[in-house]
Amino acid sequence: MVPGTYATELTATQKSLNILHEVFGINLEEYTITTHETNPEFPWLGDNIEDVSCLLISGERKLFINFFFTNGNLQNLYVFENNGVSELKLAANNIASAHAFLETYEQYSSKPLFGELSVSLNNIVANKNETIQLDDKILEVTVYGNDELVLRWCYSVYGATSYYNKVVALSFTNGTLMTFTNKWDLYPIGSTEVNLTKEQAIEIALEAVKNNNWTMTLNDDVFDPARFNALRSISWVSIGFVDSREADNPRPGNELTLYPVWQIGVVFNEFFGYLYGAEVDIWADTQEIRSIKEEHSYFAAWLKDNPPNPDPSPTPSPTSSSSVSSGSSSSVSSGSRSESGGVKPDVLEAEPVLDGELVGVESYDAEDTDGAGVEVPLVAIGFAVLTVVIVLVVCLFFVSKRGSAVKN
């Protein structure tokens, strides 16, 4: 078995074939092997990027697998096709296969991390979704049906988690390995200090938005304290580990180094073109602004310019906050994750919404004079019923005429 310390002496193709033989136990002499190696460009990952595709064929057995290396280390493994190559099924079930792979890969790579990950699976319940907090990481177990399993370990301390960068992930189908991702060493940790509370971060974000230079012209009263404040203008708050890519104020050194960051969604009380707010990222250890990214919504802006026709005689109904839920508030910004490792939608915290309004999105109640009622008008229902009756009568008339013609 080639130790990890000597792995950089091999070419990417040699390392790929070595993994197939040493980790999975495939007898390569039984196969006709075709390989294709390229050097894709991902500037933030450095200059040593290697991508290798391997096609193994022996009779009816076929394996098409891809290896992606960064700085000489395997980052991703994807199985595109596996027809009869049983060596990738390391045990009878998914959890046992995960144990087997991690223990073998620990020996191959000489990295104790994978042994620790294997131990973390000791108390996992098969066919059950769960999230487990470990010492400096969380383990997410996701089950799909009766045959698919995804395991994901994310770096996590003091409530801040790196969901997209410093991770290790495995997926299996009926005990057969399908994917392997290892970005643990690619993203070092620069600091774990959090010197800002959530409330302090919100105040900094609000002030930063007030002083930001926007691409659109805003109304003079958009920052009126009665309309722009911590209760009405914050749609979500999250804390995680983020790198310096896409940062207005990057950290020195390796741009992939992770630091704790408060990420806050700030929304206005109206749209300005497609602009409805911003995501404000704050370095939680230094209390400095990392970046301010404008948030846009083309559909919501179109809806504002093309509101439903107002009902001339709406049915009165009380205004209720249930007309637009706080869950919708969080979804406004949940799709804004950047490559640098942004928020994860299912950990966003929706803030209270006042007066039945989602800030930045007009809400109409039945008594609004500028908007449509939330209830279907009785007049509209009457017209619909009348239309159906007329259509039925016309159809019956033609059917009866046709029957008469047939008889004649």
Image: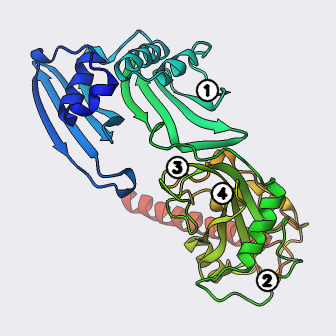
Front in this rendered view, residue 378 or 332: 332
The answer to which quarter of the image holds residue 77 is top left
Is residue 389 depicted above or below 150 in this figure?
below
Label 1 packing within 10 angstroms: few (<14), some (14-19), many (20+): some
Q: Which residue is mark 3?
A: 257
Q: Which residue is mark 2?
A: 312
Q: CA distance from mark 4 to mark 3?
A: 28 Å
Is residue 172 depicted above or below 254 in this figure?
above
Q: Could you tell which of marks 3 and 1 lies nearer the N-terminus?
A: 1
Q: Secondary structure under badge 1?
A: loop
Residue sitting at x 69%, y 63%: 265
Residue sitting at x 64%, y 61%: 333
Q: Could you tell which of marks 4 and 3 lies nearer the N-terminus?
A: 3
Front in this rendered view, residue 221 or 368: 221
Is the C terminus in the top left, top right, bottom left or bottom right quadrant?
A: bottom left
Residue 337 located left or right of residue 327: left
Q: CA distance from mark 3 to mark 2?
A: 59 Å
Q: Which residue type carries mark 1?
A: Asn
Q: Which residue is mark 1?
A: 129
Q: Secondary structure under badge 2?
A: loop
Q: Nearer the viewer, mark 2 or mark 4?
A: 4
Is residue 336 depicted above or below 233 in this figure?
above
Q: Is residue 404 visible?
A: yes
Which circle marks residue 331 in the picture? 4
Q: CA distance from mark 3 to mark 1?
A: 31 Å
